[in-house]
Amino acid sequence: MGSTLIVGLGNPGPVYAGTRHNVGFMVVDVLANRLHLQFRPGRGDFWYAGVARGEEVMTLVKPVTYMNRSGDAVVDALEQFGFPVSDLVVVVDDFALPLGTLRLRPGGSDGGHNGLASIIYSLQSDQFPRIRCGIRTEVLPPKDQTADFVLSPFALEERSTVEAMIARAADAAQDIQRSGLERAMGLFNVSPDAPAH
């Protein structure tokens, strides 16, 4: 049990709601709903919702900087709440992972994701955990259409898979909070349809 700052990446505004690039927002929205929390403006370009139970503190953050400046909001949130970088967990969409797949990682490169790149630049470190949520489809768009693809909404036939992934990502965030990243990696870095051990 401990303190965790869960940052879901996305773009603000109704035009981006429900798009592939906003999976991080969707995950923290699910967490806020589970915990009966309301988002409110923070001291910086972000909205936040928080809960404290005994020694356990979970703070949810949605940057409103747009994706390419997510790092500014993360720095502001860390400062406002007094979290060290070691308590940060970033929830992010990942074009390299098949739709519905989760990967928890303790750190690493931005993988071509502008939001992660901004956070790494602002923190001058890539050593923060992230929950990567797969958005790749079987038929990939041409490279020059990748930006349009990540800003497009999920297809109707994808939505049940997406909802299950978002729920599992929220479960993973709560498990990191309760039991730490290593245990959560062991539980969630498997295919969602893999047999239980």
Image (spheres, helix red, strand yellow):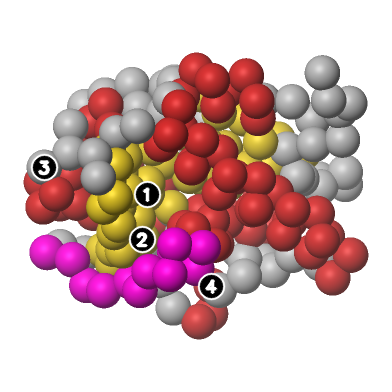
SS of the residue under disc 4: helix
Question: Of the residues shown, which amino acid type is indicated by label 4?
Answer: Tyr
- From this view, report whether residue 160 is shown above or below residue 190: below
SS of the residue under disc 2: strand
Asked whether 144 or 43 is in front, the reply is: 43
Percent across and percent down for residue 180 are 43, 25
**First in residue order: circle 4 vs circle 3:** 4
Percent across and percent down for residue 44 are 15, 62
**First in residue order: circle 2 vs circle 3:** 2
- From this view, report whether residue 113 is shown above or below residue 165: above
**First in residue order: circle 4 vs circle 1:** 1
Percent across and percent down for residue 86 are 27, 26
Q: Which residue is mark 4?
A: 16
Q: Which residue ends up furthest to the front in the rendered image?
A: 54
Spatial CA distance of label 1 from label 3 is 15 Å
Label 1 crowd bin: few (<14), some (14–19), many (20+), radius 10 Å: many
Say which mark, if any, is on residue 82.
Answer: 3
Say left or right for 134 vs 12.
right
Determine whether label 2 and label 4 are within 8 Å by CB.
Answer: no
**First in residue order: circle 1 vs circle 2:** 1
Q: Which residue is mark 1?
A: 7
Spatial CA distance of label 4 from label 3 is 30 Å
Q: Which residue is mark 2?
A: 62
- Which is more foreground, mark 4 or mark 1? 1
Magenta-colored span: 32-43
SS of the residue under disc 3: loop
